[in-house]
Image (cartoon, coloured by chain):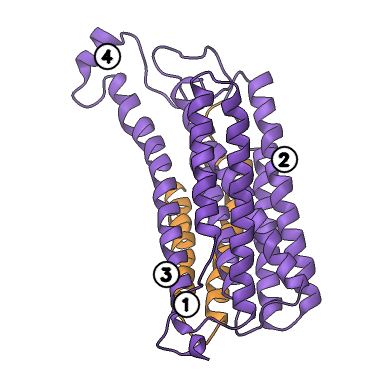
Chain colours: A purple, B orange
Amino acid sequence: MSTHAEDRYYVPHDSHWPIVGSAGLLLLMVGVSAWLNGAETGFWVMIAGFAVMIYMLAGWFGTVIGENQNGVYNLQVDKSFRMGMMWFIFSEVMFFAAFFGALFYARNMSVPWLGGESNNFFTNSVLWQGFEATWPTNGPGEVGGDFTVMGPMGLPLINTAILLTSSVTVTIAHHALIAKHRGTLKLMLALTFLLGFIFVGLQAYEYVHAYQDLNLKLTTGIYGSTFFMLTGFHGLHVTIGAIMLFIIWLRVMRGHFTPEKHFAFEATAWYWHFVDVVWVGLYVFVYWM
Amino acid sequence: MKTVVLLLLLAIVASLASGLFFLTKKNDDPTRLLRSLQIRVVLSIMLVALLISAYFFGWIPPVPQ
């Protein structure tokens, strides 16, 4: 069959998923802009856009999995999947680098400058007289009022232990896949995504605690905004990773993947490790130091 | 102490990056990616254990409350 040829790239003909995705994106964007401009129906158009997008993603990924299982992909396609994953990861690294960079810039540069460091003596004495640069802070304007800092012990430590445990379980699952221990693979993978969802639940609980008891909000100056932007986007990525692991688990249950060929598993496992490393970085720089 | 924490963090990122190398490069030995990720997990556990010890022994002050 020509599709098996090493020199020919597999191209699916007559796929309707690109046009479905385009329609979904159009609905989503029109809905969001209408809603933000006060049109109530915009909200429902946005929800419809989301639904079409989820339908498209599930359908398109399902088609790709089916094509893969039918053996229509050759080494060229394999290479393109690896390249695609690499660029996706590159964009993710840049994304988090921007937020960690914002924290570093605010904490080590702009806040000390407002306190008069470097050549900013007059910035402090004229504009922000009496402001002493410390961290955590909600700035010289004390935006958002008095607040309590989220400490590293208690819930954040429990969440760290949960995510680290999930990294151990995904590594055991990874080893089990290569060693042909399918039972262990199924169990450890299920534990991994369950731990991921527990982490997200506890993170939501931590946010409620921050808002209700600590007066620590997204609007609490530079500390509040960096805290919630970093931990919030990380939580979103844990959710995405846990959904990916769940899909991989469903595929394992259907007998997909062999000890030699399991790129989707490897990519998802690596992504989970990446999400955990981001958390360890967050735990050190946001909660500890 | 902070230097040790930062060095461990760097080592964790390096082991994750080596995993990425084996992930994106087609090779016949799937255990190389697994080994990089195993090292990554062990280093992360060491780092968190170090932070907890530092808290109890007062080696490193956490963000002021």
Q: Distance between the residues labelled 1 and 3?
A: 10 Å
Quadrant in the picture for residue A215: top right
Bin the neighbour count of mark 3 within 10 Å (Cα to Cα): few under 14, some 14-19, many 20 and up: some
At a point 58% along the width and 54% down the height, the residue shown is A276
Amino acid type at image mark 1: Val
Mark seen at residue A246: none
Mark 3: which amino acid?
Met
Query: Which circle, 1 or 3, is nearer the viewer?
Result: 1
Q: Judge by depth and name the residue closer to the eye, A167 or A121.
A: A167
Mark 2–mark 1 distance (CA, rounded to whole Å):
38 Å
| Chain containing the residue with disc 3 | A
As drawn, A137 above or below A251: above
Tell me the tag on residue A77: 1
Which one is earlier in the sequence, the residue at label 1 or at label 3? 1
Image disc number at residue A124: 4
Q: Determine which residue is flagged by label 3.
A: A83
Q: Position of residue A169 (x, y in %)?
A: 71, 64
Residues marked 2 and 4, same chain: yes
Marks 2 and 3, the one that precedes in the sequence: 3
**Chain letter of the residue beneath label 1 in the structure image:** A
